Image (cartoon, helix red, strand yellow):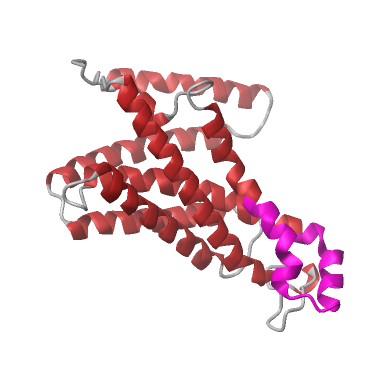
Amino acid sequence: MTESVVDIGYIELFAASALMLVAGLVSWKLELGQTRRIVVSSVRCFVQLLAAGFLLTYLFEFQTWWLVLLVLAAMVIAATQIATARVKNRVPGLSGAVFVSLFVSSFAVGFIVVEGIVHAEPWYSARQLVPIVGMIMGNAMAAVAVAIDRLFADMDARASEMFSLVALGATPSEAAAPSLKAAIGAGMTPILANMSAAGIVTFPGMMTGQLLAGADPVAAAKYQIVVMLMLSAANTIAIVAAVYLTYRRRFSSDGYYLDKGIRADNP
């Protein structure tokens, strides 16, 4: 393949913002009240991605192991804040559990892929490590928020059953087991659906990016397969860690299920 990446000019880039008029017109016509949010989201998208492009340009040229790890640490902190904000149930101490789940899943799976499959040289190569960990973290972030929401919603829906199980001697883990299974299944569903549709309905981001850059289609497909598999593994690890670290917050220290009126998160 001899094709190279087609560079998009800044005039064309800003002209593309007209595409957001579709969402803006729908919001205005149907009085959805989303116009301000659409504008803010569009501006943030421009600023954040362009800033990331300039930062990565510097990072690729002057990378050191500590600078790469510093960037990854900032990413996981930001991902924790975003994922926590997406959870509808305001639970005290949720940030710690989300941080641990994202950190463990993203770094463990990311380093396995970079070292064992991509064979990056050196191991902290920003060109490989940062995008891979970023892809993992972005997907895990959304999956964790969905799983935690489903966990607490399911436990609240089963409140009477939970009271009865605990009264009959069940441990918190035994009483919460159906909700844990439902939450993990809900969190895993999107990535499994994407895997089923890949190559038939959609060409996912990694493969599309490589094709636009002129890569061989088979080589691009191989990379995409690795990406889908690593996202599945990382999402599963993150979801399991998150729900098992948070479900006890619906129970008292001595194992009783807390009614909504006496929980710490009740407004």
Q: Height in image: 216 above or below 250?
A: above
Q: Residue at x 75, y 61 (%)?
A: 155
Secondary structure mostly seen in magenta is helix
Quadrant where the N terminus lies? top left
- Counting from the top left corner in percent of width and height, residue 244 is at 60, 65
The answer to whether 210 appears left or right of 164 in the picture is left
* Residue sticking out furthest to the bottom: 254
Q: Residue at x 29, y 41 (%)?
A: 52
Q: Which residues are magenta?
A: 155-184
- Counting from the top left corner in percent of width and height, residue 107 is at 36, 56
Quadrant where the C terminus lies? bottom right
Q: Height in image: 54 above or below 234?
A: above
Indicate yes or no whether the magenta region holds residue 165: yes
Q: Height in image: 229 above or below 111?
A: above
Q: Height in image: 33 above or below 213?
A: below
Decide which of 161, 84 is in the foreground and name it: 161
Indicate yes or no whether the magenta region holds residue 161: yes
Decide which of 212, 7 is in the foreground and name it: 212
Decide which of 206, 146 is in the foreground and name it: 206
* Residue sticking out furthest to the left: 62
